[in-house]
């Protein structure tokens, strides 16, 4: 569909040097915590750069060039880094590092029929956090990185525990809490609230993905996905 000039992807397209009309075909639902805004900004910026430079392919140099722009537009670099670079990435202060993975999991997502607005979801969070809770999350993030890199799937359920945002958000989305519990009961290694929610994501062995998806609540849509390690690409030359 043709998108207007106020669309997030169109704004990024123009800011990256693109000119003319822009069409969108996007399978990512908005308002579900699946990174819609970051993904469309990445797509728009890369298309703008490709048109400006007359390119028909994207490499890491192009990704790094547009990263500051899309990070600024999105306001959160981690929201755009995964769409741009692929795989599982860590980012801070303009640096991006792809994390090595010691496993090849399936990703099962449960997408409910209702949406949430990120700004409203953030207002449910406390303006300050305790020292103990901050230390808890730092330690668990370190454990998560180590578990993903080493393939220690038994550590993932502990590593994805959180004290900073999930409980406050789940209090406003009980179906999401039920979906997390159902994923774990059906054999997932871990489950968490995707972004600000209400989507729930889970990691599991690929052989168990069907059972995990089937065990999720019926009042939502379950999808089995695989990690994309390549990042954003151009599938056909921009004309």
Image: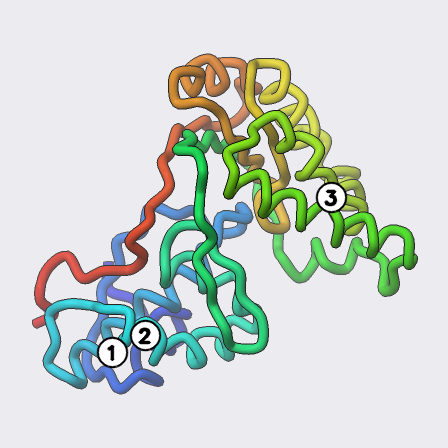
Front residue (pair 205, 127): 205
Relative to residue 83, is residue 179 drawn left or right? right
- Work out whether residue 93 or residue 200 is closer to the camera in this orientation and state it: 93
Q: Which residue is mark 3?
A: 166
Q: Which element is circle 3 on?
A: helix
Mark 3–mark 1 distance (CA, rounded to whole Å):
36 Å
**Mark 3–mark 1 CB contact (< 8 Å):** no
On screen, residue 86 versus residue 178, left or right, reads left
The residue carrying mark 1 is 48
Residue annotated with mark 2: 45
> Which quadrant holds residue 81?
bottom left
Q: Residues within 10 Å of mark 2 (few under 14, many from 20)?
A: many
Q: Secondary structure at mark 1?
A: helix
Numbered mark located on residue 107 in the image: none
Whether residue 122 is situated above or below residue 187 in the rendered picture: below
Tell me where residue 5 appears, x and y as whole percent. 34, 77
Q: Residue at x 53, y 14 (%)?
A: 215
């Amino acid at each position: 569909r043709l998108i207007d000039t106020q669309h997030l992807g169109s704004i990024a397209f123009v800011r990256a040097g693109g000119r003319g009309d822009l069409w969108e075909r996007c399978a990512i639902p908005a308002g579900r915590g699946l990174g819609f805004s970051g993904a469309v900004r990445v797509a728009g910026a890369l298309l703008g750069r490709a048109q400006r430079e007359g390119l028909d392919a994207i490499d890491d140099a192009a990704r790094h060039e547009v990263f500051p722009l899309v990070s600024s537009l999105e306001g959160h670099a981690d929201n755009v880094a995964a769409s741009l670079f692929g795989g599982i990435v860590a980012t801070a202060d303009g640096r991006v590092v792809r994390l090595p993975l010691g496993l090849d999991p399936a990703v099962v997502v449960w997408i409910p029929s209702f949406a949430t607005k990120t700004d409203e979801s953030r207002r449910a969070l406390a303006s300050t956090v305790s020292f103990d809770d901050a230390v808890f999350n730092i330690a668990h993030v370190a454990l998560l990185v180590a578990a993903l890199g080493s393939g220690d799937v038994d550590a993932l359920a502990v590593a994805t525990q959180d004290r900073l945002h999930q409980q406050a958000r789940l209090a406003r989305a009980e179906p999401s809490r039920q979906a997390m519990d159902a994923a774990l009961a059906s054999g997932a290694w871990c489950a968490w609230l995707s972004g600000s929610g209400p989507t729930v994501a889970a990691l599991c062995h690929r052989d168990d993905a069907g059972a995990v998806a089937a065990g999720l609540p019926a009042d939502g849509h379950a999808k089995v996905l695989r990690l994309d390690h390549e990042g954003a690409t151009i599938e056909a030359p921009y004309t």
